[in-house]
Image (spheres, coloured by chain):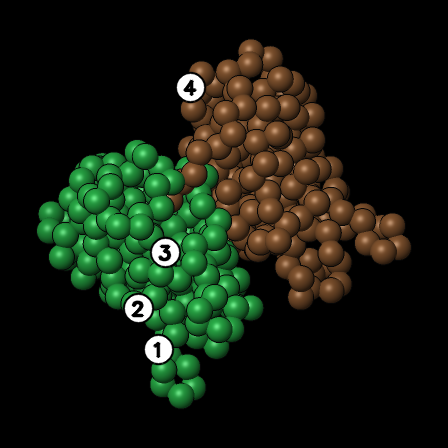
Chain colours: A green, B brown
Amino acid sequence: MSPSLPTTELSATSKPEFYAAVKAQIAAVLDPTLTQTANLANVSSVLFYALTDAPVSRKINWCGFYLTEKTAETSAKRRMVLGPFQGRVACTVIPFGRGVCGTAAATAETVVVADVHSFKGHIACDSASESEIVVPILTKDAGGSVVVEGVLDIDCLEQNGFDAEDKEGLEAIVAVIADIFKA
Amino acid sequence: MSPSLPTTELSATSKPEFYAAVKAQIAAVLDPTLTQTANLANVSSVLFYALTDAPVSRKINWCGFYLTEKTAETSAKRRMVLGPFQGRVACTVIPFGRGVCGTAAATAETVVVADVHSFKGHIACDSASESEIVVPILTKDAGGSVVVEGVLDIDCLEQNGFDAEDKEGLEAIVAVIADIFKA
């Protein structure tokens, strides 16, 4: 069942305007009193349809989350488990450092891949995906150290699907999402 | 990122054959060692695309889960919170007894609604949805009492989207899904 979203204008012509509008929608949808799953499920939907609906109409085929496993304590064995997403059935476990998602998690830096087939160690899951952006979800622990809570992963059916403005816009959105991970 | 599914035949012409094939796919995807979120996220994807891909090509616009809140102890206040899904942004909280989902949860019985607009107490979330089926996810506690763990909710853009064979097929699938809820 789907409620109406706030009628934020998503037909803005520039990417910065587009991402600012989507960020406002996502901030309106997030409810820190609910489960992380409920929040991330709705966020993946808002973002997926914002990117794929007309007039934006980008060829995004997967949009969702991988979440750092809480039980893994040593950094050598850290891994992420599939979270809520929009798209086709997905890999369930990604070790830190493996593939595009694992690289973003291990480095705590966004990874933009223009052609996934040329990315060393790419996990060849869906041959339909041609480019990818992975943004780490970062918080800080009590001591001020950066904690990688997981990643936002978006796949595109075309090469060069994501540029510097996408990176900037999605990082700002992920910063809002990161708030629900804080204790 | 999406792995290849087992190439179960989904082009079977009868609904019982179709649901048997989807059930096999879902059983293959489920991994009880992983999180409930990872499992339900992939299940909603398998089921959504099985129903909407050619040659089945049904006009399903939402397919996902609402999960009984674990902190609510008295039956009078029981409610469900949004779980993983495929489709547009969704209502986050549904009290037991409210709308189609809440009725299925409160009665522990599948509810098939041919025309959602005629269902008393229907939560009018997405005006695009015309019919709906909600299947409760049932387990038993140590004393043998039925526990409603949540519901599978599927919406259709056409009236009369679901019949007795859909009910039977989806109930068999939900019985497989229920296994991951067992302690």
Residue at 44 percent of width and 34 percent of height: B4
Asked whether the viewer can see residue B56, the reply is yes
Pointers 4 and 2 in contact (CB under 8 A)? no
Q: Is residue A85 above or below residue A182?
A: above
The structure residue drawn at horizontal position 26% and vertical position 66%, both measured from the top left corner, is A109
**Of marks 1 and 3, the one in the foreground:** 3
Q: Are marks 1 and 4 on the same chain?
A: no
Q: Residues within 10 Å of mark 2 (few under 14, many from 20)?
A: some
Q: Are marks 2 and 1 in contact (CB under 8 Å)?
A: yes
For label 2, the SS is loop
Residue underneath mark 3: A98
Q: Chain of mark 1?
A: A
Q: Distance from label 2 to label 1 (Cα)?
A: 8 Å
Whichever of labels 2 and 1 marks the residue nearer the N terminus, that label is 2
Tell me how far mark 1 sits from mark 3, CA to CA.
Answer: 20 Å
Residue nearest the viewer, comparing B82 with A156: A156
Horizontal and vertical percent for residue B68?
65, 54
Q: Nearer the viewer, mark 4 or mark 3?
A: 3
What residue do we see at 31% from left, 60% from top? Answer: A103
Say which element carries label 1: strand
**Front-lying residue, B16 or B134:** B16
User: How much space separates mark 1 and mark 4, taking CA atoms?
Assistant: 45 Å
User: What kind of residue is marked 1?
Assistant: Val
Q: Amino acid at mark 3?
A: Arg
> B183 or A172, which is in the foreground?
B183
In the figure, B65 relative to A140: above or below?
Answer: above
Q: Are marks 1 and 3 in contact (CB under 8 Å)?
A: no
Real-space CA distance between mark 2 and mark 3, rounded to the nearest whole angstrom: 13 Å
User: What's the mark number on residue B54?
Assistant: 4
- Subunit of mark 2? A
Residue tagged 2: A108
Which badge, 2 or 3, is on the more N-terminal residue? 3
